[in-house]
Image: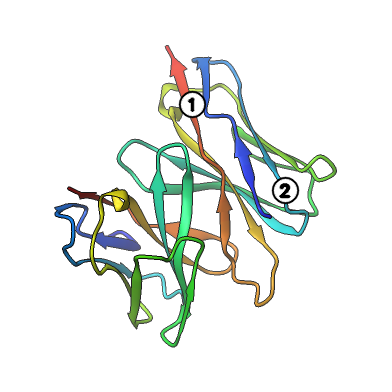
Amino acid sequence: GEDVEQSLFLSVREGDSSVINCTYTDSSSTYLYWYKQEPGAGLQLLTYIFSNMDMKQDQRLTVLLNKKDKHLSLRIADTQTGDSAIYFCAESIRGSGNTGKLIFGQGTTLQVKP
Amino acid sequence: DADVTQTPRNRITKTGKRIMLECSQTKGHDRMYWYRQDPGLGLRLIYYSFDVKDINKGEISDGYSVSRQAQAKFSLSLESAIPNQTALYFCATSDFNEQYFGPGTRLTVT
C-alpha cells in the first residue's frame, strides 16, 4: 500500500543546514511535495518535485529525490528561527482517474535553537 | 483576503451533536478536499470532490458526510459527533499539481 514515513523531530542551531528526510513506498508517485505548518496555521506549500527529476533548488531550499531508494529530502540552508515549524512530505499517486490525492507523512518538527 | 477560508476556526461540541464545518475558496478550482490532522499521524483524507456532482470517499470517511453546494463551497458534517473525532480539520483546493490549504478548524468533542 501507499505509505510515507518521516522522522518526527529534528533540532539544529541557527545558521546550520537542516536536512529533513522522507521515504515513500509507491513507485508510481508523480509529484512529491514539501509543506510547512507553523503553529496555529494551515499548511503552506514550500516546493515540489516531479518524479523524473533528481534535484530542485529554490533559494535556501534544495530537494533531492532518489527514486531507486524511494527517498526524498529537503535541505534548508542557513536555518533561521523562523524556519521552526512542522514539515510534511507528501506524494501524489498516479491512479485511475488521476485524483490528485496526496498521501502525507507524519510530519517532522524542526526546532531551531538560537 | 485568504484564498481558502474555513468556518468556524474553533468549535467545542458535545457527543451526539451534529456539526457542520464550512469551506469556501476563491481560487476557481474544481477539486476540493477535506483532511483531518492528528498528532503524529499527519493528514488523512476524509472526502474529496472533483465538481459539484462528483463526491468521493477518502481513507477515513466513516462518521462523516460532505456537501458540495457550489464550485466554491464544500462542507463537512459530523452527523453524531464522538470524542475520537476531536482533531484539526483542513480543507484544500487543487489545480491538479498543487494543493492549497485553509487555516484549519480545531474541533473538540467532549
Amino acid at circle 1:
Leu
Q: Which mark is residue A15?
A: none
- Tell which of A60 and B56 is nearer to you: B56
- Lateral position of residue B101 relative to residue B50, left or right: left
Q: Is residue A60 above or below residue B61?
A: above
Amino acid at circle 2:
Thr
Q: Which mark is residue A25?
A: 2
Residue B73 visible to an observer of this rendering: no
Across and down, in percent, residue B45 comes to: 48, 60
Q: Residue at x 46, y 35 (%)?
A: A86
Across and down, in percent, residue B2 comes to: 31, 59
Element on which disc 2 rests: loop
- Tell which of A66 and B36 is nearer to you: B36
Across and down, in percent, residue A111 comes to: 45, 21
Residue A111 visible to an observer of this rendering: yes
Q: Is residue B44 above or below residue A100?
A: above
Rendered image coloring scheme:
rainbow
Q: Residue at x 27, y 61 (%)?
A: B6
Chain assignment, label 1: A
Across and down, in percent, residue B56 comes to: 49, 75
Q: Which mark is residue A110?
A: 1
Mark closer to the observer (1, 2): 2
